[in-house]
Amino acid sequence: MPHVAVVGAGPSGVFATAELLRRPDVRVDVFDRGPTPYGLVRYGVAPDHLKIKSVTRALARTLTDPRVTFRGNVELGRDVRLPELRREYQAVVLATGAPHARRLGIPGEDLPSHVPAAEVVRWYNGFPGARDLSGLLRGPVVVIGAGNVALDVARVLVKGHKGLSHTDVPPDVLAALTPRDVRVMVRRGVADAKFSPVELLEVGKLPGVDLVVEGLDPEADGEARSAGIFREWAERPRSGGGVTLTFGFHQAPIAVRDNGVALPDRTIPAGLVVSAIGYTGERLDGVPFDDSRGLIPNTRGRVAPGLFVTGWAKRGPSGVIGTNKACAAETVAEVLGDLTDGPVFDIEPLLAARGCRWVPWPGWTRIDEAEVALGRANGRERTKITDLARLLDLGAPSENLEVA
């Protein structure tokens, strides 16, 4: 019976698992470094995008298949090593994503006032151990970027706690999210921006938010899909009664300072500067890595004999959640072409011997039930638990360690 290890329980890893299950004799062990499944759906999708988050129901159907075993809080390199997985499983599929932020490459980006968008997203999504950013929210915010991540961060910050009270944002984060002025700083013009029209239309409907647009170039931007949206915003009268969300085009920062962002002709004041200029993959011991593209080099998902990759780690941080389905199908076609029968490996004695408190699927359901109960007590559908020790107390039974 072929036994496959999938490292990463986000959409790309779960879609790969679903593809593997098309072969009826395959068994799959799915590992995630976090104690919970769903990856970026849980900790990356904006908290007010509830419809997108509902994809977890489809992901859960795969992870509860009797041929699948989920184990959370198992980190590659810490709890289990890649050579061990490659030795004991007939194939290993890496779905480790692109968790690291690209650098701005300008002076001052290492100042405490500058935070990559990935950290902001983890904070307001309740990622265990995320940096507390409440102390930096002392005034207006500048978000540097021209894509949907920049737009998400800006929207969450201008909406604040009132606009997010129905979501699963942790209470302490919610309390810190008072609505505030935000500037989205775009280094080039509208034609080069990657904002999706759907996301822009959502921003255009935010109540109590004045939209300001600077730096439009009618001649250069006239044919861009979103140019009409920005022109309409630029012509809107300002109410002056709420917060302001400004989009500044052709504003290339030259430095981050303690009090804001320096442009060639002025400094834009800000208590917090967020860079949202893209993500890059993670280097893994024993796995080749392309620094220039920020991914694991591969051919249709094949990295080496018995080793494969899918998702952002394979193609870079691009596309939407559904893009990972076709990506996974391509990779798994390569896996199945090589797959041979072998013994089913029981990894739990190894994990127990190393003191790993892994979270099985029943443990995740206990976490899930606790979060739902916590949310209902506060008039919400869910409130995330952010304390890792609490998550492990709920999800990782002490008897795991007795396997050894």
Image (spheres, rainbow, N blue to C red):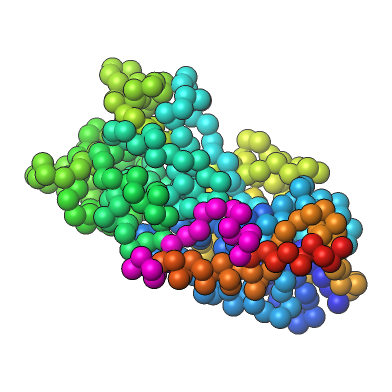
Closer to the camera in the image, 79 or 91? 79
State which quarter of the image contains the N terminus: bottom right
Residue 222 versus residue 343 in the image, above or below: above
State which quarter of the image contains the C terminus: bottom right
Residue sitting at x 29%, y 49%: 160
Q: Quadrant of residue 230?
A: top left
Closer to the camera in the image, 123 or 118? 123
- Chain part drawn in magenta: 376-394
Residue sitting at x 48%, y 53%: 126
Q: Quadrant of residue 38?
A: bottom right
Q: Give the image location of residue 56, x and y in percent.
A: 52, 69
Residue 149 seen anywhere in this rendered image of the structure: yes
Residue 266 versus residue 392 in the image, above or below: above
Q: Give the image location of residue 276, x and y in percent.
A: 44, 40
Q: Give the image location of residue 373, x and y in percent.
A: 45, 71
- Is 29 positioned to the left or the right of 385 in the image? right
Identify the residue at the far top of this view: 265
Closer to the camera in the image, 156 or 284? 156
Is 391 a magenta residue? yes
Q: Give the image location of residue 187, x and y in percent.
A: 37, 32
Residue 256 versus residue 82 in the image, above or below: above
Residue 353 versus residue 373 in the image, above or below: above
Residue sitting at x 22%, y 34%: 214
Is 138 a magenta residue? no
Closer to the camera in the image, 395 or 262? 395
Total label count? 0
Residue 330 seen anywhere in this rendered image of the structure: no
